[in-house]
Amino acid sequence: MVWNVNFNYSKPVSDATYKYREVQIPLNVAARIPPNRLLSEREWHGIGIRQKPKWEHFMVRGEDRDVLVFRCRLPMNRRLLNCCIGKSALEFS
């Protein structure tokens, strides 16, 4: 069942391994999310959250559990590039 609600999506941020994104959900939706586990892709799609495949529900934030944090593993070439930031272009050849 897809709920007709609006979600607020943050811009993705990344570290050396993952991209992260927060999705703020309405309090009435947050109240229906199980407090003791993370959501499967099918479940978060079912409440109407839309993201590309490979994102996983990673954490819940907020006093009211109304901010869901998702992560997506960066491709290996991007991870290698992130590890090498600060090196000159000559070091990549």
Image (spheres, grey):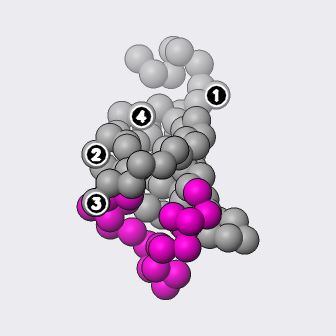
The quarter of the displayed image where residue 11 is located: top right
Residue 73 position within the rendered picture, expressed as x and y whole percent measured from the top left: 39, 49
Q: Earlier in the sequence, mark 3 or mark 1?
A: 3
The N terminus lies in which quarter of the figure? bottom left
Amino acid type of the residue that numbered disc 3 sits on in the rendered structure = Met
Judging depth in this view, the residue of 59 and 30 nearest the camera is 30
Element at label 4: helix
In the image, taking residue 10 as reference, residue 47 lies left or right, namely: left
Residue located 41% across and 17% down the image: 93
- In the image, residue 88 sits, relative to residue 42, either above or below, namely above
Q: Which mark is residue 86?
A: 1
Q: Residue furthest bottom?
A: 36
Residue type highlighted by circle 4: Arg
How far apart marks 3 and 4 lie (CA) works out to 36 Å
- Does residue 54 appear left or right of residue 73 in this picture? left
Q: CA distance from mark 2 to mark 1?
A: 31 Å
Q: Nearer the viewer, mark 3 or mark 1?
A: 3
Residue visible at 39% across and 69% down in the picture: 39
In the rendered image of this protein, does residue 42 appear above or below residue 6?
below
Q: At label 1, which amino acid type do we have?
A: Gly
Q: Which residue is mark 4?
A: 78
Counting residues from the start of the chain, the first of labels 3 and 4 encountered is 3
Q: Is residue 39 visible?
A: yes
Residue range highlighted in magenta: 26-47
